[in-house]
Structure formats: C-alpha cells, structure tokens
Image: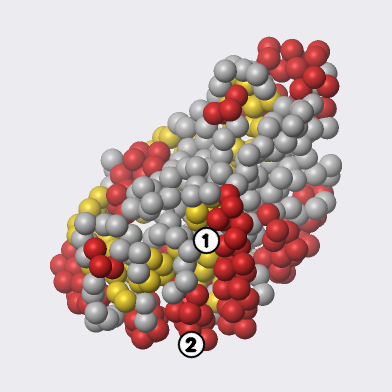
Amino acid sequence: MTTHTSALDVQLLERLRGAVHGDIVEPGDPGYDDARKVYNAMHDKRPAIIVRAVDAGDVIATVDFAREQRLPLAVRGGSHSVPGYGTCDDGVVLDLGRMRGTRVDAEARTARAEGGCTWADVNHATHAFGLATTGGIVSTTGVGGLTTGGGMGYLARRCGLACDNLISVDVITADGSFLTCTEEHNADLMWAVRGGGGNFGVVTSFAYRLHPVADILGGPTFYPLDGDVIRRYRELIADSDEELGALLVVGLGPPLPFLPERWHGRPLCGVITCWTGPEDQDDQVRARLAGLGPVVGQHVGRMPYPVINTLFDELVPAGLFHYWKGTFSRGLPDGAIDAYVEHGATTPSIQSATVVFPIDGACHRIGPEETAFSYRDVDFSTALSPTLTTREDCEVQKDWVRGFFTALQPYSAEGGYVNFMDHDDQDRVRTNYRQNYDRLTAIKRRYDPGNLFRLNHNIAP
C-alpha cells in the first residue's frame, strides 16, 4: 500500500520537525513498523507519519499540521481502541505514549495524569498515598480513551465512573487552542469530554478526584457455567454494600495453577472480587462467594489495589485479534442469563470473555444530563469480546458475537457503552448518548466544525 508521505507539503513537514521535541517516524524509518502497531492486531495500517509527542506544544503543532494538510488524524494514548482509532492509513498518528507524567496531591486527594498515561501509571502513583480512583481492569489501558468514554472498573459502585471523578482537563482543540476546562471554566467542553469520547480535541492531562483505597480483598472465584450461579450473583450485587466491586466473567477455564486441569478450556463463570470495605468483613465476603455455587477454583486474598487491575494482563497482551460488542441492561433479566449460558458454552477461545460490569451505586447518583454519559438508569454493562490469535479465526467468530448480541437485545437498553463498540457500530452513536446527543452535536460544531477529530465513534458537527 502506498502512502501520502511523498505528497506531504515538504515545507510544512519541515516546519513540524522544527516545532516538536518528540520524534517523527515515517515509512522506511527503522522503527516505523513497531511505531505503527496498536493493541488490536486486526488493524494493520500504514500512517504517513507518526508523531511521538512529549508535551502539549508537540500536540498543538501536530494538530495544526494535520488540519492544514487536511489529513486524517488518529490520536493514540494506550492504543487499546478495539476499533483501531489509534491508527490510520495515509494520515497522521499523534502518539501520546511518551506523555506519562503523574502528580499526586495527597492532601487534596487529587491526581493529575498526562494524556499518554496508562492505568498502571496512575495506580502506581496514587497507591503510594493509599489513594485510588476508578480505572480500567487491564493495567495497560490508557487513561484517555477509558475516561472520555465513561470509564468502568472495580471501584465504580463505590466511587462512580472514571469520568465522574474528573475535575479538570487540558484540551487541545481543532484550531490548536489550549484550553483548561473545569465545571466553572469552559464548562461545556468539560461536560462533553466526560463520556463524549475523543470527538472534541486531544486531552493532554486529566485531573482526578481520589478516594482512600489501599489494600483490598480481591481475586477470581470460578464456578461451573450455570444460570443459577449467575442469578445468585445478581442477588449478591443487589444486596451488597457499594464497597464490593464484583465483575461477572463467562468464558473458558484459563490454565491457572489454582484451577484444576480438568476445568482448563471448559465453560465456566467467574466472579472477580474487589472488596474495599473493612478487613474484618473479609470472611463474610468469602462466605457470600461460596454461596453462589460449587467453587471449582479460587484465588482470593488481600492484595494492593493496583494488583487487581493486572489480573487480565497476561491473558490479553497486545497483538491478539479482537472484535467487540456491548450492551446495557436494567438488572440481569432471566432471559439475558439464559443467553450468557447458551452462548458462553461456545466461547471461541480462552482469551475470549463475556464480562459484566455492575454500574449501580455511586454511578446512579449522577444525573443523566450531568455528564455526556447518559445511561444512569442501567445496572450492568456487558462486553462481548471474541479474542483470537489469528485474523482468520477472529473473522469467523464475528458470527458468534453477533448472534450473542442479538440474543441479548430483548433484555437490553437501546444504547450501549461507547468503549465496547467496534468500528461497525457507528449507527449506534445517537442511541448511546440519548438525550445528550443534540447538545454534544452543538459542542462539536463549536470546537471542531471541520470534524478533524473524526476517527472515533463520531458525533458529526
């Protein structure tokens, strides 16, 4: 495939080289093939240039260059975008991966993280002070994509979504302006980036509210795949204090030392526990887990909070092939549970998983119009994610996830979580934002009328 590199305005490119402190990588450079890789190997694209920014000045210069050259602009943080929005053919990739500074104000219980940070970076910095905020369940996930899409994780029931804990952002808009946004200053843009995705600019730093979270009771408990186990999990969430974060996972038994070999590769369901309440209640939590059904494997114990966010890392490293779908639901209806059991039994690989996130508790104490994330009346968010080791196998298994998704529709809300959408879900953007869509469109029109930031689940101006 040819690129537009030779068609780039040489004078503008040289001006860009002089304006950035980071590297510019082009086709033919020794590091080009590594620099263009993204987490989801389904996307093998060839950008015209990749700018490895080191500061906000580099970001401004790159945004100006892409706008003036009328080139596609892909913004990459942690590179975990399943639809591959962190890369593009024949355009500009703005890679924030070198902008990973963090600063914690322990007295104010806040942290500021640069736009290229991963959740491992944030969790490491905040844990030193016995503090944390809601983040992703894979430590290599970037803070930017997760937060601007809403941001689910183990602490959501207690602390709200990642975007609910956002108190300030620095944003580079399409005209190259640098804007600091809070609820009092540039409030419309602040509102939009709290769930509206990457439609409105490049966020170069995020300031989060932190919560006292140090060591937790956490880890997985596995059961045979059975609808009664899932129904008891439903009761567990409904009856438990918000300090209990507990994800439901449906899939095939992974080759873990605490799971008997006869269960490896067999259909299972599991509960990944993150109890942030008092340690003297640990035994009560263990008892509730034991009451869900026959335990076939368990590794639950006291651990530092950052560890719980690494448990999926080895199972889903970069370079696998992914295709995702997502749904919201009010409660876990019996029909949805039946679909989990039926389709979970034919999960295509050990790396594939159906993950159910509870988003009640603190998530419900934010109004549907207080942030761009509008689904404050749902209780669970489900990610359907066949993950395979070859492109061909992933293409074949798209039918599995589409059938699963169809089976869940009678029990699901109309929209879904934007970060669980793949590239063919653009027709769901309006329903994902419901009553907030028109306001988001107006803000998009104000800050990005030319739709420079269109490589995302796009809100057109």
Q: Is residue 236 above or below residue 169?
A: below
Q: Give the quadrant of the N terminus.
A: top right
Q: As drawn, is 395 to the left or to the right of 237? A: right
Q: Amino acid at mark 1?
A: Ser
The location of residue 340, given as percent across then percent down, is 47, 77
Q: As drawn, is 70 to the left or to the right of 387? A: right
Q: Secondary structure at mark 2?
A: helix
The total number of labels drawn is 2
The answer to which of 414 and 260 lies nearer the viewer is 260
Q: Is residue 38 above or below residue 239?
A: above
Q: Foreground mark, 1 or 2?
A: 1
Res 375 label: none
Look at 75% across and 46% down and name the residue there.
454
Q: Is residue 75 visible?
A: yes
The location of residue 259, given as percent across then percent down, is 24, 63
Q: Amino acid at mark 2?
A: Asp
Q: Is residue 134 visible?
A: no
Q: CA distance from mark 1 to mark 2?
A: 21 Å
Q: Is residue 71 above or below residue 136?
A: above
**Which residue is tagged 2?**
334
**Which residue is tagged 1?**
385
